């Protein structure tokens, strides 16, 4: 089967267009909007990237396979298709966190994504589903999952945590899509049937903050040495988080401590 050669810029290309202080702190709407079209995705890449690179063949294959299941029963894009689109968007440049964050520049420690796209996709769907099920069990008004963005897994003090963003809509008439953040902790199958428990799951508000993976922040916000409870240093700036005290992992700001998270 012939795989189309889509080209996108990668986040690493940010190194060639040095971020300016005050540059947009958050993800642009086209990246956060899970309903953005494929044409929007590709056209952004051609205008923003100085060095477009091809998408990995595995991602192209996923995009191709999902085009047949693009529309769900309601005529909207299917959950699967939207998740794959989010996975592809991970290869686009992303604005850096706001000042005073500074990029860590040791090239030998540059971020490497280890897991294959199909593995990331499966994990993403599974974690988002279990987080929202957990959330719905505690709420009168139930939410329906619309899509999820690639998960970030991290080890901290010997424990495994996962951060994930997903979009959901409540069953209330006229409700809008809502972006959520969830943190899951691996506790083993003796404690939970799926092996994971949800340590945080909530809709994001205007006080959400981006991940700071690959960046350092010196000074005031660190509550104690090497720990900054206001930010997550394990996720890239693509991932939005609630207030720092709502989740457990990702707060250590020692350079490269989360380099091998994926
Ligand atoms: Zn995080």
Image: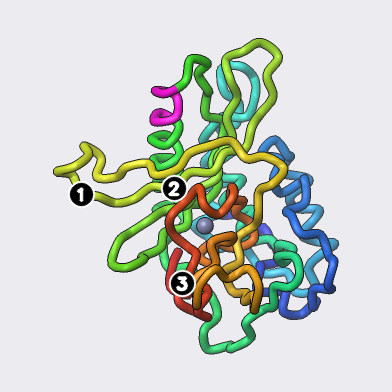
Q: Are marks 3 and 2 in contact (CB under 8 Å)?
A: no
Q: Earlier in the sequence, mark 1 or mark 2?
A: 2
Name the mark on residue 108.
none
Q: Earlier in the sequence, mark 1 or mark 3?
A: 1
Residue under pointer 3: 258
Name the mark on residue 188.
1
- Which of the pair 46/48 is nearer the observer? 48
Q: Is residue 67 above or below residue 63?
A: above
Q: Residues within 10 Å of mark 2 (few under 14, many from 20)?
A: many
- Horizontal arrangement in the rendering, residue 40 relative to residue 218 (left or right): right
Residue under pointer 2: 183
Report which quarter residue 66 is drawn in.
Answer: top right
Task: Report the magenta residues as a range.
Answer: 133-138
- Horizontal arrangement in the rendering, residue 180 relative to residue 40 (left or right): left
- Any part of residue 1 in sight: no
Identify the residue shown where x is 45% and y is 43%. Answer: 200
Label 1 element class: loop
Q: Is mark 2 within 8 Å of ligand 1?
A: yes
- Which of the pair 47/35 is nearer the observer? 35
Estimate the x, y position of residue 211 in percent, counting from the top left: 60, 60
- Our reading of the magenta stretch's main secondary structure is helix
Q: Earlier in the sequence, mark 3 or mark 2?
A: 2
Identify the residue shown where x is 54% and y is 32%. Answer: 79
- Which of the pair 108/173 is nearer the observer? 173
As measured in the structure, the alpha-carbon distance from the residue carrying label 3 to the one carrying label 2 is 16 Å
């Amino acid at each position: 089967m012939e795989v189309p050669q889509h080209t996108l810029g990668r986040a690493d290309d940010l190194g060639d267009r040095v971020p300016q202080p005050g540059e947009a702190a958050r993800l642009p709407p086209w990246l956060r909007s899970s309903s953005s079209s494929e044409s929007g995705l590709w056209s952004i890449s051609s205008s923003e990237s100085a060095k477009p690179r091809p998408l990995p063949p595995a991602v192209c294959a996923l995009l191709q396979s999902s085009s047949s299941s693009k529309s769900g029963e309601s005529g909207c894009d299917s959950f699967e298709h939207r998740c794959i689109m989010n996975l592809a968007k991970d290869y686009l440049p992303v604005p850096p966190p706001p000042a005073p964050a500074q990029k860590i520049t040791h090239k030998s420690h540059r971020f490497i994504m280890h897991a294959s796209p199909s593995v990331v996709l499966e994990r993403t769907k599974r974690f988002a589903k279990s987080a929202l099920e957990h959330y719905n069990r505690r709420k009168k008004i139930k939410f329906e999952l619309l899509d999820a963005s690639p998960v970030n897994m991290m080890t901290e003090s010997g424990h495994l945590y996962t951060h994930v963003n997903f979009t959901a809509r409540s069953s209330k008439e006229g409700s809008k899509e809502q972006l959520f953040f969830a943190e899951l902790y691996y506790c083993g199958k003796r404690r939970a049937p799926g092996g994971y428990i949800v340590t945080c799951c909530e809709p994001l508000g205007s006080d959400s903050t981006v991940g700071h993976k690959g960046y350092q922040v010196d000074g005031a916000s660190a509550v104690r040495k090497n720990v900054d409870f206001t930010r997550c240093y394990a996720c890239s700036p693509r991932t939005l988080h609630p207030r720092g005290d709502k989740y457990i992992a990702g707060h250590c700001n020692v350079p490269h401590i989360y380099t091998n998270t994926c």
